[in-house]
């Protein structure tokens, strides 16, 4: 008998094996796997069951700019949230991924989003430059525009 655990989770459709494979590839930093699973039709917004992480959350957590680029170009939601309401920007803050945060901010990520504990991405970083960037994103936009992202 097939497990129906997936029905209790906020999926719009039953996850496919390739969706989990995409998530695994992101978790392990496997760029080739990410490209493969996306090309095979994996759901770019597949939600990890336990904590609700999306593929982009893993790429941001590792600060993997190339993987982030692939996921974003494939349509990843830059403001997608985990079960604890954390965005990819929160992951950048927690693990001090400044370059990844700059890319997300340039693309419109909202640094004002609070997680379930009431923390913004800037509240989670120990890097003073990243904290300043996240706290002052509007004033910093001119500086960010000078950074190249294609």
Image: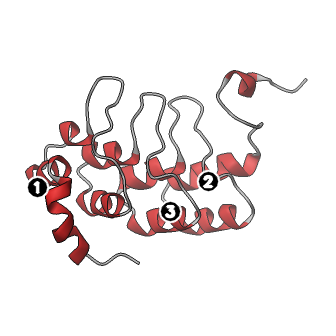
Res. 64 image quadrant: bottom left
Label at residue 143: none
Alpha carbon separation for disc pair 2 and 3: 9 Å
Marked residue nearer the N-terminal end (3 or 1): 3
* Residue 77 x %, y %: 51, 52
Q: Nearer the viewer, residue 17 or 56?
A: 56
Q: Is residue 107 left or right of residue 8?
A: left
Alpha carbon separation for disc pair 3 and 1: 25 Å
Q: Element at badge 3? A: helix
Res. 141 image quadrant: bottom left
Alpha carbon separation for disc pair 2 and 1: 31 Å
Label at residue 129: 1
Q: According to the image, label 2 marks what residue?
A: 44
Q: Element at badge 1? A: helix
Quarter the C terminus occupies: bottom left
Identify the residue at horizontal 74%, vertical 24% (top origin).
7
* Residue 123 x %, y %: 19, 36
Q: According to the image, label 3 marks what residue?
A: 72
Tell me the crowding category of disc 3: few under 14, some 14 to 19, or many 20 or more residues within 10 angstroms, Cα based: some
**On screen, 137 above or below 40?**
above
* Residue 73 x %, y %: 54, 68
Marked residue nearer the N-terminal end (2 or 1): 2
């Amino acid at each position: 008998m097939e497990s129906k655990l997936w029905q209790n989770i906020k999926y719009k459709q039953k996850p496919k094996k390739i969706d989990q494979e995409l998530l695994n590839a992101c978790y392990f930093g496997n760029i080739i796997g990410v490209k493969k699973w996306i090309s095979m039709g994996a759901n770019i917004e597949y939600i990890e069951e336990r904590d609700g992480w999306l593929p982009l959350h893993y790429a941001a957590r590792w600060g993997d700019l190339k993987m982030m680029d692939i996921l974003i170009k494939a349509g990843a939601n830059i403001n997608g949230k985990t079960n604890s309401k954390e965005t990819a920007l929160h992951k950048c803050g927690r693990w001090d991924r400044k370059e990844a945060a700059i890319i997300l901010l340039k693309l419109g990520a909202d640094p004002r989003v609070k997680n379930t504990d009431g923390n913004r991405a800037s509240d989670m970083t120990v890097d003073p430059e990243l904290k300043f960037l996240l706290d002052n994103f509007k004033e910093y936009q001119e500086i960010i525009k000078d950074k190249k992202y294609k």
